[in-house]
Amino acid sequence: MNHTDGPSRSIFVATHHKSGTVWMMTTFIRIAKKNGWRFIHLNEGESGWALRPDKQQVFDNHIAELSADQVAIFNDYHSDVPDLTRAKQSHSIRGVHIIRDPRDMLYSAVQFHLKANEPWLDEPDPDTGTTFRQRLRACPDLRARIELEMDTHMGWTIEQMANLDDQGVFINVRYEDLITDGDMRRFHRVLVHLGLAGPDLINALDAYWSSSLFGERSDLDIEATRTHINNSTPEQWRTQLPADCIDLIEERFGWAIEKLGYPRSNAAEAPGS
């Protein structure tokens, strides 16, 4: 489909925990509403980190239900992307995959999990009887907390993010680029990739502005994201993480940092840099 033909019939938005999940979900719900499109949340029925095993079938069923003139936006905040092979045979599908520097994701996760009101944080482990929040609070220091995050949910998240198969559909878009996108040029390019043009594109930019920290968010938006936003600036790890924490993360996930296109902490010191 040419960009001038209108939007892709199916748009897939893939994010990860602490990579702008609420922000992107709010934005694309608004885009769907403004343009009269369907918004399909593929995480419905999931609890915490327990992914639904029938997601492929759920996705295929939704695709089959779409009429010839319908546009649908699919959203998954675990980037648990089903096989799109069959869907691509009958639909134009384009996707955006939001990535973030794993070092910032880990630091953000520690801060968020200490105070967030998400139910899974206070569900006792059947083997130990302790909750994840209790385990996190019991850690003696930031290094130990980051290690716990890497050993559990956030370690899985980083691996999922670095190893996502684009299936010829997705482009990677950095959270760091979007959070500083006050003139909306970067998101404009994202929307063009997704096939938007004309009034649909203008409506989408308006939705982005209404959902973003640099835009004109409503009081409801501000309250809804109050516990989700601790510090949204890029490269927090450079000032917030001590050297031993950075070394710990890069020893475990240096491969992911590099694969995602971020520099290691010592990159500026490398010969010829």
Image (tube, grey):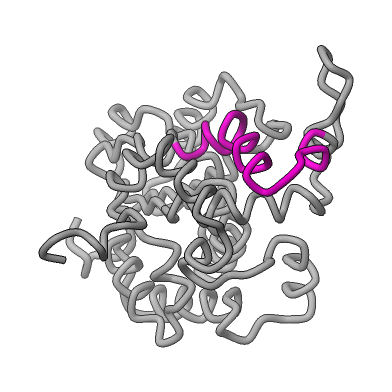
Query: Residue at (43%, 55%) from the top-left corner?
Result: 101
Report the side of 217 relative to 54 (left or right): right
Please determine whether, in this image, residue 23 is positioned above or below residue 10.
below
- Tell me which corner region of the image, top left, top right, bottom left or bottom right, holds residue 49: top right
**Residue at the extreme top of the image, as rendered:** 127
Residue 23 sits in which quadrant? bottom right
Magenta segment's dominant SS is helix
Q: Nearer the viewer, residue 159 or 144?
A: 144
Quick check: can you spot residue 36? no
- The answer to whether any part of residue 207 appears in the image is yes
Of residue 160 and residue 154, the one placed in the foreground of this image is: 154
Q: Position of residue 145 (x, y in %)?
A: 68, 42
Residue 267, quarter of the rendered image: bottom left
Left/right placement of residue 17 relative to residue 100 reads right
Asked if the stretch drawn in magenta spans residue 255, the answer is no
Q: Position of residue 151 (x, y in %)?
A: 58, 29
Query: What is the count of numbered marks?
Result: 0
Name the residue furthest left. Answer: 272
The residue drawn where x is 29% and y is 71% is 189
**In which quadrant is the C terminus drawn?**
bottom left
Residue 73 lies left or right of residue 256; in this view the side is: right
- Magenta range is 135-158
Work out whether residue 54 or residue 78 is closer to the camera in this orientation and state it. Answer: 78
Percent of width and height locating residue 56: 47, 25
Q: Which is more toward the observer, 116 or 235?
A: 235
Q: Is residue 20 above or below residue 42?
A: below
Q: Residue at x 44, y 55 (%)?
A: 100
| Quarter of the rendering occupied by the N terminus | bottom left
Residue at the spot x=83%, y=50% of the render?
117
Q: Position of residue 54 (x, y in %)?
A: 56, 20
